[in-house]
Amino acid sequence: MSLAQLRRTKGHSQRSLGKEAQVSHSTIYEIEAGRHSPNPSTVRKLAEALDVTPEEVIEAVEGPKVSAPPSYREPTLNDVLDEERRAQDLGRDWAERVHEILEYHEDALQESFGHASRLSTIGEEYLARDVRVKAIRTFQAAYMYVYASFDDGRRHFPDVDTPELAQAMAEWLKRVDEVEEQRPEQRGGGGKVVELKEWRKSA
């Protein structure tokens, strides 16, 4: 069981677990994404918040010890059905993951917009516009990266393409379109950049 799965079984979102464990939800996001290894103090805090042992947290982060592979046998119909069910469970997990990643990048976007607004109030309009453009580009790039990652997964495992995953991606795309409407015009009157439109044509 991964840390994300363990967290969900305890009824926590990344944000609520972070509050309970007194750890930033961005740190939990990074740990679950495999980009950050928790130090002993963080492990203890997470264990207390999840009401599990530190060893269980470490296993959730690093994965269980690998045992010797079983001897090969021909798959049965039950094996195939089990594989489909696991793929559908994975699709639903991916859908929740998409929501969590969107929440993370939405927070970053709003923080950048707030910074841009503060720059505008002191007359730094050019700098404020650059901050907004960069924030929107980063938000869109995150969507394109996640879409490409999950699209590759769907090609290899078609059964993960659950309604929940499709809805999660559609919700993020809708948000991307809303954010695109807030993109300031480029210096020199060039209007909106076309990276996202061009990418959609090729996606």
Image: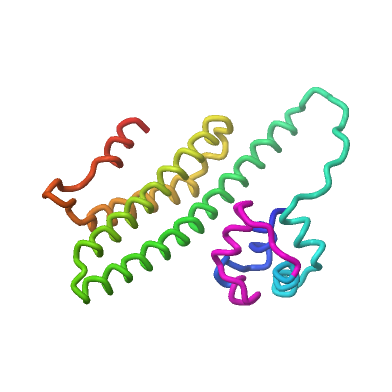
What sort of colour scheme is used for the picture? Answer: rainbow
Is the C terminus in the top left, top right, bottom left or bottom right quadrant?
top left
| Residue pictured at 73% horizontal, 29% vertical | 77
**Could you tell me residue 152's position as x and y percent?**
51, 34
Which is nearer the eye, 118 or 144? 118
Asked if residue 190 lies left or right of residue 10, the reply is left
Asked if residue 3 lies left or right of residue 157, the reply is right
Which is nearer the eye, 73 or 103? 103
Dividing the picture into quarters, in which one does residue 3 lie? bottom right
**Could you tell me residue 183's position as x and y percent?**
23, 55
Dividing the picture into quarters, in which one does residue 129 lie? bottom left
**Could you tell me residue 128's position as x and y percent?**
25, 64
Asked if the stretch drawn in magenta spans residue 18, the answer is yes
96 over 124 or under it: above or below = above
| Residue pictured at 22% horizontal, 71% vertical | 120
Q: Residue furthest left?
A: 189
Asked if the stretch drawn in magenta spans residue 34, the answer is yes
| Residue pictured at 28% horizontal, 35% vertical | 198
Which residue range is magenta in the image?
17-40
Dividing the picture into quarters, in which one does residue 11 lie? bottom right
Which is nearer the eye, 23 or 39? 39
Asked if residue 79 lies left or right of residue 32, the reply is right
| Residue pictured at 68% horizontal, 36% vertical | 83
Q: How many marks?
A: 0
53 over 186 or under it: above or below = below
**Could you tell me residue 40's position as x and y percent?**
76, 67
